[in-house]
Amino acid sequence: MDALSGLIDTQGVRGVLGARIAAGEDWGWWSAETPGAAFHAVTAGTVWIAPEGGDPVQLLPGELLLLPSGGAHALASDPDTLARTSPQRSDDPLVAGDGTVRMGRGSARTHILCAHYAHDPVTSAPLLAALPPVLLLRGQGEDEGLAETVRLVGRELAAPRPGSPVVLARLIDVLLVQALRAWLAREDDSAASPLHAVRDPAVSAAMALIDAAPGDAWTVTRLARESAVSRATLARRFPAILGETPAAYLTRRRLDLAARRLRDTDDTLEVIAQHVGYTSVYAFSRAFRRQQGVPPGRFRVAARAGTIAS
């Protein structure tokens, strides 16, 4: 498993299909803030989008917009309608029998897939937090694979068939990976983050090793040897690029895994502690409380009750 796959998998990042918009002329819709990242892909026509307090952006066929923080935003048919769309002034959508949201007057000329992405609330350091507030990807000229996936989405939206919701859900996950690839290919910001670490061969290799077996007794020396770099190089580059030491990353990964097992299984603390690499329940419980703020037993109760905030 490579580092990017490991980050997406370990943080449980998943796309959830939202609205399928079929729009005509003269329409504006206010989208309230969502708990995950908001996502829009245009398969036909054009749409104008403006994040709350931000500049308007026009999306054309094959293009997509990702709002990693899930902030409120307006969607509209044209700049004038966009400017007057707000929480107090938003058109009421008409939901068709197939679930499509109909907007505007006349025949549908614009088709938009709306979705959102969320990470598992029991994991730390949300993956998408490293992205800019607004991520616009043009598709053509940046990533042909991205444009092709948007075209596949368009075909499913234009002619739904049995299983289309499942296909669309899978394509939404594919689009996120392709969007992250495209952003990493063009982004030159040196800020430390898990996403930036993906571009460094040595650091990403070490991350992938930890993600694949967080319960192993990893040391910087062993990670460096299996990543084919010197210990000094890895010890210097890992915190500079990722923002934390290999030991801190390993601890966080172990405790994230433990949090999932506490919520999703009936395993005892002894079993979970051993599985994630701790030799004693005491050491595990103390480390877990430092990261989560509560002991493992209390965390298990809260997580199963759904009171753990993302």
Image: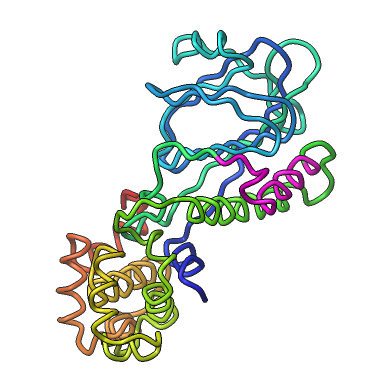
From the viewer's perspective, is residue 95 above or below residue 198? above
Helix, strand or loop for the magenta stretch, by majority? helix
The residue lying at 63 percent from left, 24 percent from top is 47
From the viewer's perspective, is residue 138 above or below residue 196? above
The residue lying at 48 percent from left, 40 percent from top is 135
**215 horizontally vs 16: left or right:** left
Please check the rendered image and state whether residue 147 is part of the magenta-colored stretch, yes or no: yes
User: Residue 228 is drawn in which quadrant?
Assistant: bottom left
Work out whether residue 35 or residue 135 is closer to the camera in this orientation and state it. Answer: 135
x then y, percent, for residue 48: 58, 22
The residue lying at 54 percent from left, 56 percent from top is 181
**29 horizontally vs 67: left or right:** right
User: Residue 211 is drawn in which quadrant?
Assistant: bottom left
Q: How many marks?
A: 0
x then y, percent, for residue 84: 49, 8
Work out whether residue 265 or residue 138 is closer to the camera in this orientation and state it. Answer: 138
Colouring rule applied to residues: rainbow
Work out whether residue 141 or residue 16 is closer to the camera in this orientation and state it. Answer: 141
Q: Which residues are magenta?
A: 137-156
x then y, percent, for residue 18: 60, 38
Work out whether residue 187 or residue 243 is closer to the camera in this orientation and state it. Answer: 187
x then y, percent, for residue 63: 64, 37
Please check the rendered image and state whether residue 207 is part of the magenta-colored stretch, yes or no: no
The residue lying at 57 percent from left, 46 percent from top is 16
User: Residue 53 is drawn in which quadrant?
Assistant: top left
From the viewer's perspective, is residue 226 above or below residue 214? below
